[in-house]
């Protein structure tokens, strides 16, 4: 499959190879053409045909009744919580989840819920522990009303959570009358990695979101998918948060292009494995079993340096990576990083390691 862009678009404007995230990508030429020619209307009153088409496609791909186009993954997450539970409820989520750690405290500040973080190694809740953290309403406790999952898990590793565990959590939650929601920012990466359709993977979930501006290379946007009743409520909550937009079909058009070609994510996974193997050969610490999608976590302590020093030196050699812990660096492969640039990255790392040894 051809993933080429206009050469001007392959790299960031300062001509670095940018592997800090898959959010640094540029819309493809096909997306730009679709955006230019998009039919538009006022989406707040339901008159944008391109937004309606995107929402219809999102619901179909994930096997749900309805879908809502939102401005970001964070907005989708907060709208989902606002739509599924009342203020004062308790929600259970991973202690390392994006919703708990990286959304500016919105669960408490905006949604008015009590988050209960639970350790979930590699995104998998120990079911006995999960059940032990479910509370009924009492004079002293907030009732548990929602369980939130994340797939792929850990923005610094991209680990795939399998369907059996998703189903097990859903069965447990539903047995207790609790909704189960999936923050699926990169769930299409998980779907492609497992060779399982999104609809099959998410069939027991009450709601799921997917980010269009991460691995899918769209300029902006996220989809929230669930029942008709839930999405009707979500549309009101989006409006309350200032997320209603007018001629949004210009943005939705890029999402249509991306969703019709999401299987190309397999190419990003392939590039990640090739790069991880090459970096491991240079002495960097990489757990290959955890390179499951497009994210590589690199332990630089194996070469006697820190993450900040490594990234600063690497940038001088034309490659951007992200320090995520004192001795850990993240690289994410994406559509704007073609295989032809792999050698350039490996050579930049070699030069960096040589310079750091001096």
Image (tube, rainbow, N blue to C red):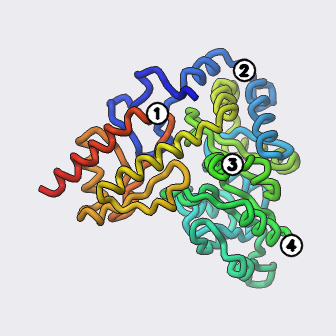
Nearest to viewer (mark 4 / mark 1): 1
CA gap, disc 4 to disc 1? Answer: 44 Å
Q: First in sequence: mark 1 or mark 2?
A: 2
Q: First in sequence: mark 1 or mark 3?
A: 3
Q: First in sequence: mark 4 or mark 2?
A: 2
Residue found at x 60% / y 59%: 99
CA gap, disc 1 to disc 2? Answer: 28 Å
Task: Tell whether 134 sits left or right of 150.
Answer: right
Estimate how packed mark 2 is, as few (under 14), some (14 to 19) or many (20 or more) residues with alpha carbons within 10 Å: many
Q: Nearer the viewer, residue 52 or 319?
A: 319
Q: Position of residue 321 (x, y in %)?
A: 36, 48
Residue matched to label 2: 40
Task: Tell whether 316 sits left or right of 160.
Answer: left
Q: Is disc 3 placed on a helix, strand or loop?
A: loop
Q: Quadrant of residue 115?
A: bottom right
Q: Is disc 4 placed on a helix, strand or loop?
A: helix
Residue found at x 77% / y 53%: 202
Rendered-image quadrant of the C terminus? bottom left
CA gap, disc 3 to disc 2? Answer: 35 Å
Visible residue check, residue 76: no
Q: First in sequence: mark 4 or mark 1?
A: 4
CA gap, disc 4 to disc 2? Answer: 43 Å
Q: Which mark is residue 336?
A: 1
Estimate how packed mark 4 is, as few (under 14), some (14 to 19) or many (20 or more) residues with alpha carbons within 10 Å: few
Residue matched to label 4: 175
Q: Position of residue 237 (x, y in %)?
A: 74, 47
Whether the residues at callouts 1 and 3 have beta carbons within 8 Å, the answer is no
Q: Residue furthest top?
A: 37
Residue found at x 75% / y 41%: 68
Q: Nearer the viewer, residue 171 or 14?
A: 171
């Amino acid at each position: 499959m051809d993933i080429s862009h206009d050469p001007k678009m392959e790299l960031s404007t300062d001509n670095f190879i940018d592997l800090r995230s898959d959010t640094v990508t540029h819309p493809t030429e096909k997306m730009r053409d679709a955006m230019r020619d998009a039919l538009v209307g006022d989406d707040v009153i339901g008159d944008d045909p391109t937004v309606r088409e995107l929402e219809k496609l999102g619901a179909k791909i994930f096997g749900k009744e309805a879908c809502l186009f939102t401005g970001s993954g964070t907005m989708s997450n907060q709208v989902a919580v606002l739509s599924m539970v009342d203020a004062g409820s308790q929600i259970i989520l991973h202690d390392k989840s994006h919703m708990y750690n990286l959304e500016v405290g919105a669960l408490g500040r905006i949604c008015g819920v009590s988050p209960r973080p639970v350790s979930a190694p590699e995104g998998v809740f120990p079911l006995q522990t999960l059940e032990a953290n479910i509370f009924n309403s009492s004079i002293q406790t907030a009732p548990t009303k929602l369980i939130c999952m994340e797939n792929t898990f850990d923005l610094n590793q991209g680990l795939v959570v399998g369907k059996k565990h998703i189903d097990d959590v859903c069965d447990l939650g539903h047995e207790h009358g609790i909704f189960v929601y999936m923050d699926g920012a990169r769930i299409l990466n998980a779907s492609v990695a497992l060779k399982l359709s999104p609809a099959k993977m998410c069939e027991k979930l009450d709601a799921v979101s997917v980010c269009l501006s991460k691995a899918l290379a769209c300029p902006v946007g996220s989809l929230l998918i669930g029942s008709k009743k839930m999405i009707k409520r979500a549309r009101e909550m989006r409006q309350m948060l200032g997320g209603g937009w007018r001629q949004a079909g210009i943005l939705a058009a890029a999402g249509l292009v991306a969703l019709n070609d999401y299987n190309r994510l397999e190419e990003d996974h392939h590039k990640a494995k090739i790069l991880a193997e090459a970096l491991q050969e240079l002495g960097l610490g990489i757990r290959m079993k955890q390179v499951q999608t497009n994210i590589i976590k690199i332990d630089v302590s194996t070469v006697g340096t820190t993450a900040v020093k490594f990234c600063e030196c690497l940038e001088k050699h034309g490659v951007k990576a992200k320090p995520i812990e004192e001795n850990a660096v993240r690289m994410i492969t994406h559509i704007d990083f073609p295989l032809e640039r792999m050698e350039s990255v490996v050579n930049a790392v070699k030069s960096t390691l040589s310079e750091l040894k001096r």
